[in-house]
Amino acid sequence: MITFEGVTKRYADGTVAVDDLSLEAPTGAITVFVGPSGCGKTTSLRMINRMIDATGGRILLDGQDVREIDPPTLRRGIGYVIQQAGLFPHRKIVDNVATVPYLLGWDRKRARARAMELLELVGLDSELAGRYPFQLSGGQQQRVGVARALAADPPVLLMDEPFSAVDPIVRASLQDELLRLQSDLQKTIVFVTHDIDEAIKLGDMVAVLRVGGRLAQMAGPATLLSEPADDFVREFLGRDRGIRRLSFIPAKDVRLVTAPADLVVDASGRPLGWRGDGGLLPYGTFNPERDSLRAALDAALLAANGTAVAVDEDGRVIGVAPREALDEVLGQYAARYTVPDPEDPYEEGGHQDTGHQGAGPEDPAHEDPAHGEDPHG
Ligand SMILES: Nc1ncnc2c1ncn2[C@@H]1O[C@H](COP(=O)(O)OP(=O)(O)OP(=O)(O)O)[C@@H](O)[C@H]1O
Ligand SMILES: [Mg+2]
């Protein structure tokens, strides 16, 4: 775990880049720092591996103050990935990846073998190993950057806008790749981005920073979308945050009905289309076991008749979700967050902290009416 305790960074010219930052980046999880340009993301990240030293507060790595660890030792356990990969242009890919093992004194053969293993891990063809960075695409270079950071198998990985320089499609595949890697490796990752979509996709926890290096909110992505702490966070999440929240609502509760005869399927039960006058009409599918409500709605919108087709792992039809069924689930979630917001917990001055539920059942005053009437009536 990485712990920021009241961390401040004031640069020599007086700029306060980070101001009294306190947060925890849990072990084995991805914590994303997100916020507008200049809000202190890079500064915060670099204080972890002491490329920059804090001027106030402290940063603990598994309970130990990083200032008590000498920088080379500290960095041995921390991989670092930056935008545009930062590869050494005059070194072959394999040697770029083996940089840290070489520094650690591994013999050349072992270091190169490790590099080849890592290139495969990040999805790169082994024949790229002998090329130079300029002979690779931007996305491939980023993958090499990730491989290099993982070379000595560090428990911690710091990533500063690693995917910002590539186009959206490549970026999406790099993000997927990182999530796949992370599900195997379970590193403690601190990931910096200014892209809220990337933050929400990758983050187990998301820290939203505002300019001046102050923490606006730290929460899991679903909570961030449903309960932004203030107007700054709300604005930063954007107007479509309601739609994006749907990605975090499982589709498994959507009520299914038997597929009507209008849905044409092949011999193995996979959908072919909705029967129309002139032939088959478009359909959309979702897998209730695996997909989100967003996928279910998407499936409904793709269909000619607004009915989403539910399929199993093999793509076989298991039923359909009529519009009302989707409405029911949407209604439940809409209600959950629109009901009580009697007090703003983030307001200055503070209220009695009774939590979002208001008075619980342990409060006798709220129990009285319900229990008091019956015996006498
Ligand atoms: N060496 C420095 N000396 C003085 N001020 C600095 C220095 N480095 C950064 N700053 C200032 O500190 C603030 C935070 O910078 P930082 O690079 O951490 O922001 P960032 O959130 O990473 O921004 P971006 O999204 O643009 O990368 C900015 O106002 C920046 O101008
Ligand atoms: Mg930065």
Image: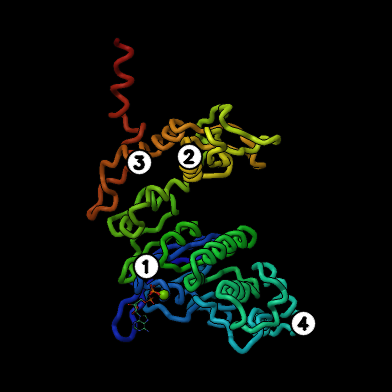
Nearer mark to the viewer, of 4 and 2: 2
The answer to which quarter of the image holds residue 81 is bottom right
Tell me the amino acid under the disc marked 2. Ala
Task: Give residue 337's mark.
Answer: 3
Q: Distance between the residues labelled 1 and 4?
A: 44 Å
Q: How far apart are marks 2 and 1 (CA)?
A: 44 Å
Q: Is mark 2 within 8 Å of ligand 1?
A: no
The answer to which quarter of the image holds residue 274 is top right
Q: Position of residue 334 (x, y in %)?
A: 37, 39
**Label 1 belongs to which residue?**
21
Task: Say what secondary structure mark 4 lies in.
Answer: helix
**Label 4 belongs to which residue?**
109
Ligand number 2: quarter of image: bottom left
Residue at position x 63%, y 35% from top?
265
Task: Say what secondary structure mark 1 lies in.
Answer: strand
Answer yes or no: is residue 78 visible: no
Q: Position of residue 73 (x, y in %)?
A: 58, 80
Tell me the amino acid under the disc marked 4. Lys
* Screen quadrant of the C terminus: top left
Which is more toward the observer, 295 or 59?
295
The earlier-in-sequence mark between 2 and 1 is: 1
The reply to whether discs 1 and 3 touch (Cβ–Cβ < 8 Å) is no
The reply to whether discs 3 and 4 touch (Cβ–Cβ < 8 Å) is no
Task: Say what secondary structure mark 2 lies in.
Answer: helix
**Label 2 belongs to which residue?**
300
